[in-house]
Image (cartoon, rainbow, N blue to C red):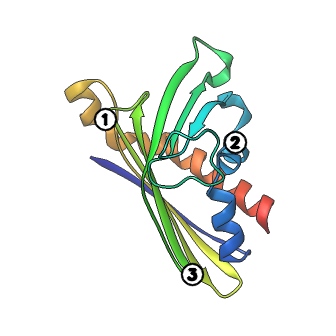
Amino acid sequence: MATYRRETVIDAPFEEVWAFHATTDGLEALTPGFVNLEIDRVSGPDGEADPDELVVGSRIEMSVRPLGLGPRRRIVSVIDDRRLDGGAGSFRDVMESGPFDRWAHTHQFFADGDRTHLVDRVEYRLPGGALGRAVSPFGRLGFAPMFRDRHRRTKRLLE
């Protein structure tokens, strides 16, 4: 399985950075407009609609239509791990259905005084069987600008 990783230091307290990422508001703010993201439904682990926070078992149903081309692509993502311990926290969303054969995105946050280290790690496998597996390592060429933009947006919005 291929992996992509990006780390940035945000000049904002851990609590603010964590809270920003703990809801779909953060997802919407960090997704570039050209992706045309629509959040269709968010449910908590017990099925309650629009929970205040994304916790283990939360499910996000969304769709994208990059560049406005082609049909909307449905994506379902589930939070399958979440840890919060003082000045450190993480959560992982796993794509249940969508354009990748495998997608597990771990968001990590570490307090450093009034700053926060933000680490994104994505384990993924492209579709297409053996060919997809062979070219998956090249996926990082597309992830680099996307995550660079996400981290810049995070800095701009929170610092």
Using the image, tell me which numbered label, if any, was put on residue 28. Answer: 2
**How many other residues sit within 10 Å of disc 1, few (<14), some (14-19) or many (≥20)?**
some
Residue that numbered label 3 is attached to: 87
Residue 21, by quadrant, is bottom right
Determine the residue positioned at 60% across, 81% down.
111
Tag 1 or tag 2, which sits nearer the N-term?
A: 2
Q: Is residue 125 above or below residue 54?
A: above
| Above or below, comparing residue 46 to residue 132 in the picture | below
For the C terminus, which image quadrant? bottom right
Is disc 1 in contact with disc 3, using a CB cutoff of under 8 Å? no
Q: Which residue is most to the left?
A: 130
> What is the x, y in percent for residue 11?
73, 75
Q: Are marks 2 and 1 in contact (CB under 8 Å)?
A: no
Q: CA distance from mark 3 to mark 2?
A: 25 Å
- Mark 2: few, some, or many residues within 10 Å (few <14, many ≥20)? some
* Image mark count: 3
Q: Which residue is mark 1?
A: 135
The x, y position of residue 109, in whole percent, is: 55, 70
Q: Horizontal placement of 153 versus 110: left or right?
A: right
Position of residue 135 relative to residue 112, above or below, is above
Residue at 58% in and 17% down:
72
| SS state under label 2 | helix
Of the numbered discs 1 and 3, the one sitting upstream in the chain is: 3
Please name whichever residue, 129 or 80, is drawn nearer the observer in this view of the structure.
80
Q: Nearer the viewer, mark 2 or mark 1?
A: 2
Question: Element at badge 3?
Answer: loop
Q: Residue furthest bottom?
A: 113
Hey, which residue is sitting farthest top in the picture?
70
Q: Is residue 112 left or right of residue 159?
A: left
Q: Secondary structure at mark 1?
A: helix
- The residue shown at (65%, 42%) is 50
